[in-house]
Each structure stands twice: as C-alpha cells, then as structure tokens.
Image (cartoon, rainbow, N blue to C red):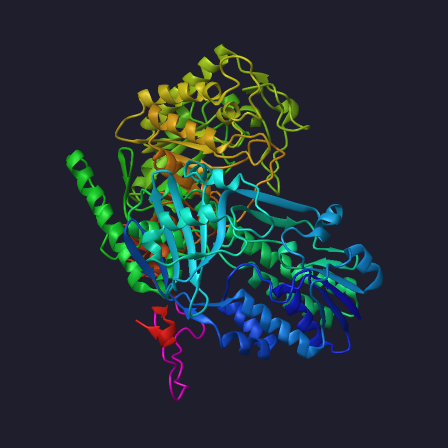
Amino acid sequence: MRIAVIGGGPGGLYFAALAKQLSPHWDITVWERNAADDTFGFGVVFSDETLDGIAQADPEVYAAMSAEFARWSDIDVRYRGQVLTSGGHGFAALGRKRLLQILQERCAALGVDVRYRTPAPSAAELAAEYDLVVASDGVRSQTRGAHAEEFGPDLDQRHCRYMWLATDKVFEAFTFIVAERDFGTLQVHAYPFDGTRSTFIVEIDEDSWRRAGFDAFAARDLPPGADDEDSIRLCEEILAEHLDGHRLIPNGSRWISFTTVRNRAWRHENIVLLGDAAHTAHFSIGSGTKLAMEDALALAACLHEYPDVPRALAAYEAERKPVVESTQRAAQASLEWFENVGRYTGQEPLQFAFNLLTRSRRVTYDNLRVRDEAFTGAVDAWHQEHQEHQEHQEHQEDRGRTAVGRPSDSAPPMFRPFRLGGVRLRNRVVVPPTALYSAQDGVPGDVELVHLATQAVGGSGLVIAGMTAVSADGRATPGCPGLYTDEQEAAWRRITDFVRGQSDTRLGIQLTHAGRRAATGTPRAGGRCVPLGDDGWPLVAASALAWDAASATPREATREDMDAIAQDFVAAALRADLAGFDVLELQYGHGHLMSGFLSPLTNVRTDEYGGSVTNRMRFPLEVLRKVRAVWPASKALIVRISATDWADGGIGEAEVVELCRALAETGADAVDVSTGEVVSHERPRFGRSYQTPYADLIRNTVGVPVITVGAISTYDDVNSLILAGRADLCAVGRAQLHDPLWTLHAAAAQRYAGPAAPWPAYWEAGSGRPPGARTDRIPPRLQLLRDVPAPVHQRWLPEHATAAV
C-alpha cells in the first residue's frame, strides 16, 4: 500500500509511525510545509486513558514521552484572592516541540519518508497516485475546504478571544485563574509542561476584550508569525499578581477565536480526515493533540484489521466519530461555561470552584468525592451552612408555619430542603408533569390516583400532575384531565386526600390550554399526535398557523377569546386551591397556547400582542397576573417555559432572560425550564441534562429559582447541579417512571436515612438492597503486597521530581 499523509504534526507523524510499524512494507510519505524544528503552541496534556493506548501501541514512543513528562494531580482555582485546590485528578504534560522530536525520530527509525519544508500536492492529486490520503492538515484544512460538499463541514466560531502563550513561571498544578477587573472578567488556563515553563492561555469575552482596549492592538496589521506584543504586555500587567515577576513568552501569539470543527463525514473515496481537520474540542477540556493521536491509533488499527481501504475507513469513522462527538459535547459545555463565566462570579469561592470543576458534566459530585473527599466535603459543609442560614431567615419570617424536618449534617445536597414560594419542600427532587391520557371527559380517575400516590410515597419533594386543561377546548387529547367542572374538582380532591394520607410530599398541578396542539389523539409510538379531524374541537392560537401539514389551522385569538381564556385559567386556579394542591404550574411552553404567544415562530400577529418580545409576552403576563391575584400566597406558583425553540429564528437567550425577569416581577415563585416542542421542525440536541444550561442561564442571570429538567437520571447529577448552583430543584422524569421509588433508592445508595427521604412504614423492609447472587461473598486476599494508594495531592515540583504534599 502507498499512503500519503498531509501534515507532519503529532497526529500525522504518529499515524505514519504506527502504520509503518504494523506493515513495514507499506510506502508512507509525509508532507510537512514547515521545518522539522518549527512548532507552534507549548505544552500538550494527556489523559491516563490516552497514555495507556500509546504505551500498548508503541512502547518506544511511550518510553521516550514518559521520561520527560511533567506529572501532577492537583487543580488550583484562583478566585477572589483565594486558591482552592482539588486533588486526585492525574495529569501528564510534555512540550509540543519535544513530542514532535520524539515522533520524528520514531518515523525516521521506521523508514517513513517525511518531507519537511515541502507543501503537499492537493489531496485530489495525491488520491490519484496513492492508495490512501490522510489529511492531517489542521483546523484550516485545505483538504476539507476543497471537498466541502463531500465532508459537510460545520465551523462554529465562538465569541471569546484567546491567546496561546507560555511563561517561565512553573506552575505546580493545572491552574485556572479568574481575574475580575473593571472591564470585565478574564480567565487563564495554565499548566506546567517541563521544568522551566508552563502553558498560559489567556481568554476573555468579546465585550470585556474591547473594554480592556485589546481591540485597538488587534486592529493593526501584523506580518505572518508576528506576536501582538502590546496585548502581551497588557496581559502581564493585568495578571502581574499571578505571574510573580515572571514573563509571558509568545510564539506567533495573537488574539484568535476558537472554532469548533465538525464534519458530516470524515472520508471521501480514499481521502480521510484526521485530527483538527476532522474535529476540534475546546482547550479547556482537553488537547487537540490527544484527540489526533487517538485518531491515528484507530486509523492505523482499522487499516490493519480490514482487507481494503473503503471498509477500513468506514470502520475508522464508525469507531472514532461517537468518541469524538462525546468529547465535543463535554467540550461545548465547558466552552460555554467559560464564555459566560461572569454569570458565576457572584458565587462564593468554594461553590465557584466546584462549579468550574463540574462545568463539562463529565466530572460530578461523586466523582470529585472519590478523587478528593476533603475538597468535596468542604463544599458540602459550605452548602449546608448556607442552607441553615436560609432556614433560619425563613423561620424568622414565618414563625407560625410548620417546618419540614431539618436534614442531618450528612445529608447530600439533593436531600436539603427548599422553600418554593410559600411551600417548603423536604428535598430538591421533583416529579415533573406526566401526561397519562387516562381521563374520561376530563375527569381524573384511578390511573391518576395510582400514579400520583406511587410517586409521592417514592420520596420526592414535589409531584406535579400533568397537562390539566382549563377548558374542554383546551385539552390536547380526549384523555387529558381538566379542572373546569365540579366533577373534575371533586375527583382531584379525592386524589389529593388519598395521597396526603400516605405521604407529606407536596402536590402540584399543571394548568394549560393546548392552543394549536389541541384536539389530537393519544400519542402513538415515537410521540406523534394525530389530529382528531371531524371528531375534534375548534382550535385557537396566537396566530393562524397549523402545527404541521396534517393539522387543522387554528383561528387567531381575538381579544374576546383572550379574556375568556384568562378567566378559564383563573377559575381553574381557584378550583386547584379547593382541590388541595400546594403548587400551581402554568404551562407556557411546549407549543401550547401561551407558548404560541411567546415564540416569534408561532406568533406573527401585527397588533399589540405580536412583534417584539415585550408585546409577545403581554397576554401570558396578563394571565399570570390574574392567576397570582387569586392563588394563595401561602402556596407556590411556578411557570414552565420553553427556553429555546431548537429552530432557526426562534426565541433567543436575551428574550428568555427578559421573559423570566418579567415572570418573576409579575409573581412567579420559580421557573420550570424546559425547551422545544414549539414547532414541528425543531432539531433538539439531546444529551444528558441537555436542558440544564438554560436553567443555569436563568438562575444566574435573573436570580429567580429554577427547576431543571431533561435527561437527568442519576442522583450524582442531581447533587452536582444543586451544589454547583445551576438549579434549585431537579425534575427527574423518565427515571422515576422506570423506578417510582427512585428518590428513596437514591437515599439508600448514599446511606442517607434522614427526614428528607422517609420510607413508608409498610415498605420499610425494602429500604435496603435485597441480597442477590454472590452479593454475600467476601473476596480473599490475593496480593502479597498491596498497592500503595496514590497521594491525593501531587504537585509538579521539578527540582524534587514528583513530590506529594
């Protein structure tokens, strides 16, 4: 086989070395336009997982790398004059120049033809001559650009500016510096990579960058490879207290914006993308070099395992793409956290550090506790003390109210109480509204009773009955319950009375008018609702826009319609109070009537209820104001919204913030933050806790309490989200349908047995995990000498090699 490699960076060289090692008879040529000793960037960080792969694939390369690694296990967060340290992480770094030398020497020893200072022919030319062309030509890949139609690139240029530098100050750990100045917040990502230098990446959001005056320096024309010396000097001044008199070292350093590279496909005929040409992930979570070397290993292996190039390339893409996409999801969360770091600079230092460390959602509460129990314990203690202070203040304000039992000092964050409006919840877990489609003429029956009772005794702090219509025409389906007749009110009262006899879990009900989503049948498999057609009822919406091509077109709501609907909400709220509910939720999301007013995609009115976000939220605020006037202050009133439409032209972040601020000012005690289901052509980005960033935005921008929902299924995630300050309450939906005792089982798994998770007396025998096969087996000792545990805190102290402190 003849292989051409475009680009002699770490990914291209490592692939060439591995492929030649596996098949010495292959003819492999690498084109590199720079000289062998040219390099950009400074240190490269590797995970233990990647290093294990390198050690297995090429022990000689690994031995050469590991002999010069800077190793440490601590992360330092420098914030508001404090240094907060979390240990047990494990890092290894190496200078990029030294890494290239090792790979160059390995390629030379194996007989790879590496042509330095030689621009490669185009990929198309090489493809005609070689069996395989590996395009490892970087983030600005000419190969990707020349074959854009086939690869389908998506280049997402982000908002922050950053500059890649080094310093002769040797940091002892991975160090995040968050510096608040009069122009805004600036952050640094720094880590050592040898005995004399550290990588030092300065990052700042666009507005702060301009206010600091950096834009004036960047506006000048600099020759290729030149450094922005004025910006570097200003960074030294701003960060002087962290540099301790040391200097910043440039290498073609100037302000740039990070671009996340994604491609629909990584291969075209016999051309394949590798490394930054195929994908990038933000530097705050990992190394592009690490990903490129993992690509190289997988590609070389697939070429060895499959009999021809097409099948090998298909296997390579199938193997690597899911891994990279997972990394990119975590990197995107981390990138967005740093883009919006100003949201969190009001947090106390311990919570801020925990928030930073868990920003990508890969590191969690439990994960940190395993790594460094003392650090997580300190954050826990702070949160407990903060909770107790709030409890004391609430007690002073509300002496006559019956308090929920105080959690024990060892209560995990999810089992600490929360006050929602006038209601105190014993823990932070919510069962969100669930559509059961079992009502007859809007009257809830035994199915609703069983569901709410089971979920209530399952231990959560709040259970909300779902999708309850305020009128017959407001029902989404014939099976939806309502609260617009005396019979319905009595049926709900029967349910709440029964549940209260079993549990002190708070009960809520969601009121809605389905708008253009009304008059459909029970959803089929996949969640699709089919219009009822002639068996349906008239539809009313913000605008005369059908849900999809198969749906009826609603009429545009008149002022008279709006007055009547507002009164329906008020009447239903009064009935909800009489029916015994503690919490009222108004459905302003998911494409229902109020959501239709709020989204610019579904509201095209030309009167005072359409156009600007101020106009679009006018009617929903009118309804909230009227409901708030009749709903008791001793109870809680929350509003559910769709914080994004997941479609071009939909509601934006600034509008959502303005909406939530208005909701809070009009009387909402909290916002239940969901997303989507507003238009049929939505393209949501599903993933673990994928809606939480929107709850985080609202909580830390508006200051209103929030419920987060969406693919939250582990108690570890709930603890992490609460402790980091991203949400006040977590709605766990499908996991609690899978296991109605999810909350109680979460308490048992964490060995919590306090008042925030009481087991019903009749089920108490099940509070411990029942014995199963081999669960009672005690393994014998089979090691003569046990491994010595690695120290939690390990600093990079070159003069003492690796010193534990």
Determine the image quadrant of residue 541. top right
The answer to whether residue 395 is left or right of residue 119 is: left
Furthest toward the top, the residue is 560
Furthest toward the right, the residue is 128
Q: Nearer the viewer, residue 534 or 157?
A: 157
Q: Nearer the viewer, residue 618 or 522?
A: 618
The answer to whether residue 442 is left or right of residue 21 is: left
Q: Give the prevailing secondary structure in the magenta stretch.
A: loop
Task: Write the residue at 53% across / 74% down.
Answer: 65
Residue 41 image position (x, y, % from top left): 53, 59
With respect to residue 731, does 616 lie above or below? above
Q: Can residue 53 be spotted in the picture?
A: yes
Task: Write the residue at 55% across / 76% down.
Answer: 62
The answer to whether residue 10 is left or right of residue 313 is: left
Image quadrant holding the C terminus, namely: bottom left
Residue 310 image position (x, y, % from top left): 78, 62
Residue 643 image position (x, y, % from top left): 48, 34
